[in-house]
């Protein structure tokens, strides 16, 4: 066997192992959950409010930050949300940031869809979502950057990182049913 034919045989063997049905990936149990996965609560872990709130990791492409926030009905009765969620962002000391809330997020960007206010009824196990949208931009160097560490929606608090620059503007889309 020549060196050239040995290399060819080795290459074919590698290609076959890579693409001929041999699954070298870890099993589902061994794989960590992706960072944007939504954790479902068991009824025993459901807060007294009957709802749980989770926030996915923000997508921060080209200075625009978009973060999906999901409210899940983990209780045993139907719950409804309507319109735009009332949100606050707290700083490291737990004080609320002075923000302009942009309902519909159109003053922040037109790249995020907002379907407008509607009532979303959630049976047990169903979820609704909204998006937070902001930019880390500065209107001048005389204003300090606004940095938030906690999102507050109703009675729920979710840790996060909100680098709002000096503009103090946070876009919020309306509640919509989550898949």
Image: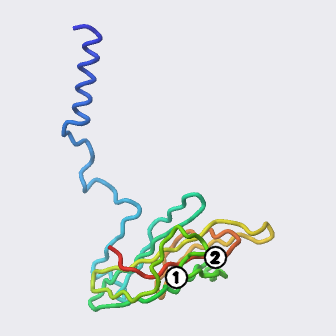
Residue furthest to the right in view is 142
Q: Which residue is located at x 57 percent, y 75 percent?
A: 106
Question: Does residue 110 sit above or below 87 in this rendering?
Answer: above
Q: Outermost residue toward the left?
A: 21
- The tag earlier along the polypeptide, 2 or 1, is 1
Comparing 92 with 171, the one in front is 171
Residue 120 versus residue 2: which sits nearer the camera? Answer: 120
Asked if the residue under mark 1 is in contact with the one under mark 2, i.e. CB atoms within 8 Å, the reply is no
In the image, 15 versus 116, the foreground residue is: 116
Provide residue 41's location: percent of width, then percent of height.
31, 77
- The answer for how far apart the CA atoms under marks 2 and 1 are is 16 Å
Query: Residue at image x 28%, y 81%?
Result: 125
The mark found on residue 152 in the picture is 1
- Is residue 136 placed above or below 104 in the rendered structure? above
> Mark 2 against mark 1, which lies toward the viewer?
2
Q: Nearer the viewer, residue 134 or 95?
A: 134
Side (left or right) of 20 relative to 57: left
Residue at point 58% right, 57% down?
62
Quadrant in which the N terminus is drawn: top left
Residue at image location 67% in from the left, 72% down from the top:
146
Q: Quadrant of residue 95?
A: bottom right
Rendering coords of residue 70 (x, y %): 41, 76
Q: Secondary structure at mark 2?
A: strand
Residue annotated with mark 2: 169
Q: Position of residue 162 (x, y in %)?
A: 58, 70
Tell me the element at label 1.
strand
Question: Is 99 left, or right, of 82 in this rendering?
Answer: right
């Amino acid at each position: 066997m020549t060196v050239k034919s040995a290399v060819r045989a080795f290459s074919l063997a590698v290609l076959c192992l890579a693409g001929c049905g041999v699954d070298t990936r870890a099993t589902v149990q061994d794989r960590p959950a992706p960072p944007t996965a939504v954790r479902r609560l068991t009824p025993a872990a459901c807060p007294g409010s009957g709802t749980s709130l989770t926030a996915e990791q923000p997508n921060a492409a080209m200075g625009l930050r978009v973060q999906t926030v999901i409210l899940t009905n983990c209780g045993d009765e139907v719950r409804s949300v309507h319109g735009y969620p009332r949100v606050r962002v707290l700083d490291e000391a737990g004080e609320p940031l002075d923000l302009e809330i942009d309902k519909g997020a159109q003053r922040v960007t037109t790249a995020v869809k907002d379907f407008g206010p509607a009532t979303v009824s959630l049976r047990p196990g169903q979820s609704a979502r909204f998006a937070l949208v902001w930019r880390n931009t500065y209107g001048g160097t005389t204003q300090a950057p606004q940095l938030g560490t906690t999102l507050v929606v109703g009675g729920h608090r979710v840790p996060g990182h909100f680098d709002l620059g000096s503009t103090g503007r946070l876009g919020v889309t309306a509640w919509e049913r989550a898949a």
